Image: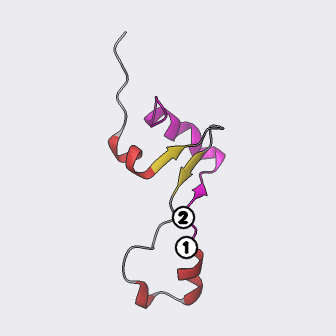
Amino acid sequence: MAKLKTNKAAKKRYSLTATGKVKRTKSNRRHLLANKTKRQRKQGKIQNAYLDKTCESTVKKLLPYGN
């Protein structure tokens, strides 16, 4: 049986923890921060957020070897 290919876009955005959770980085923190409110900037500081259960199975299919 052939090896499964890892989705490169998903590999850059998500990572799997040892317990099997999918870790992601919060969005809206790269640029245009001067136009955002203090609350928006503060909420985006969390670097390690976890994916909710509804999307988790889809992302795990894109990362078959847990990259």
* Label 2, residues with CA under 10 Å away: few <14, some 14-19, many ≥20: few
Q: Amino acid at mark 2?
A: Gln
The residue positioned 50% from the left and 41% from the top of the image is 59
Measured as percent of width and height from the top left, residue 37 is found at 53, 89
Measured as percent of width and height from the top left, residue 10 is found at 41, 45
Residue in front for this viewpoint, 56 or 30: 30
The residue positioned 42% from the left and 90% from the top of the image is 34
Measured as percent of width and height from the top left, residue 40 is found at 55, 81
Q: For residue 62, which quarter of the picture?
A: top left
Q: Amino acid at mark 1?
A: Lys
On-image quarter of the C terminus = top left
CB of mark 2 within 8 Å of CB of mark 1? yes
**Left or right position of 53 against 23:** right
Which element is circle 2 on? loop
Using the image, determine if residue 45 lies above or below residue 23: below
- Residue stretch rendered in magenta on the structure: 45-67
Measured as percent of width and height from the top left, residue 43 is found at 59, 76
Using the image, determine if residue 13 lies above or below residue 5: below
Q: Which mark is residue 47?
A: 2
On-image quarter of the N terminus = top left
Q: Which residue position is annotated with label 1?
A: 45
**Left or right position of 28 against 49:** left
